[in-house]
Image (cartoon, rainbow, N blue to C red):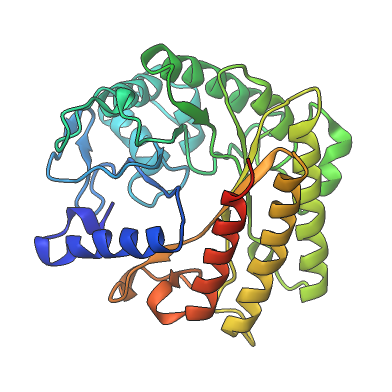
Amino acid sequence: MSMASEPSCDTGKVTDTFEQASRLKMNVVRTWAFSDGTSYKPLQSSPGSYNEETNGIYLILSLVNNYDDYGGRKQYVQWARDKGQYLLSDDDFYTNPLTREFYKNHVKAVLTRNNSITGVAYKDDPTIFAWELINEPRCQSDLSGKTLQDWIAEMAKHVKSIDYNHLLEIGLEGYYGESVPERKQYNPGYQVGTDFISNNQIPEIDFTTIHLYPDQWLLGSSEQTQLQFVKKWVQSHVHDSNSASIRKPILLAEFGKSSKAAGYNVGQRDAYFRRLYYTIYACARSGGPCGGAMFWQLMAQGMDSYKDGYEVVLAECPSTAALINQQSRKLATIR
């Protein structure tokens, strides 16, 4: 989204990257449908005010950020304070009537926006795969999960009231909560106010998601400990998504290997990707609920200021590109 809003000399990076991805048979990409307030080149500069020079991309579109990057919950809370609301923390984003109204208005603006190229409203655009309510929702002030459960239920109904044709997911990392306490053993030692089981039981949610960052979640742990966590994390969520209590597909929506880790090399990353790809392919081939994974994050050359260590630049990593291509082609053979 950031590159699409740059002058014409940079928008070519979007086209070039999509062309590279297409050649490797990748078919779904997830990006932001938000950039709020005073963030760089905002999409939504104030509640309901949009910069139409920012180009849309047809993908999984996330509708707000949990974090401060690109505005996020913090910006919605500040907008409410600017209107005279007394809010104690960013977690009030989920409960304050005005922040909820701002969010609903943003959802409506994005879903009913006409594609500037085709003239088709986004809610009717078949090139959009799914909507995401929020990137990695967290509510540390209420670990019972009730605050987020209520917000997800309300906003999922709101999205479906405008657009019942597209798929909808929450944006969860996968943390377990109080609805099935014994599943909390799979968490990386803490909770964030979400509940993978109850959140995904909401009828309007069409598929589940998990993210996977053992290097961040298990700081200081050994490579072997992290690999054991990865195996259990994926297996438990695949099992639960396929269980009678949920019965929905699952997408590994974010994973990666950071180049900033000690001793990193591309071979390590390829081995990590290969291990996860094998698990996903085996699940899909056996008729299981998981049929795809999305690494964080795909970039073009010349985007150094956006790099966070997890970036994959296809032109610079032929071995990783070949691995992605192989996985995409293998998955495409499954019907």
Which image quadrant is residue 212 in? bottom right
Which image quadrant is residue 335 in? top right
Identity of the residue furthest to the bottom in this view: 263
Q: Position of residue 119 (x, y in %)?
A: 16, 29
Q: Position of residue 114 (x, y in %)?
A: 19, 28
Identity of the residue furthest to the right in this view: 182
Q: Residue at x 18, y 46 (%)?
A: 54
Q: Position of residue 104 (x, y in %)?
A: 36, 21
Is residue 222 visible in this depiction of the protein? Answer: no
Is residue 226 visible in this depiction of the protein? Answer: yes
User: In the figure, is residue 208 to the left or right of 120?
Assistant: right
Identity of the residue furthest to the top in this view: 161
Q: Residue at x 65, y 27 (%)?
A: 199
User: In the figure, is residue 285 to the left or right of 260?
Assistant: right
Which image quadrant is residue 326 in? bottom right
Q: Residue at x 70, y 32 (%)?
A: 195
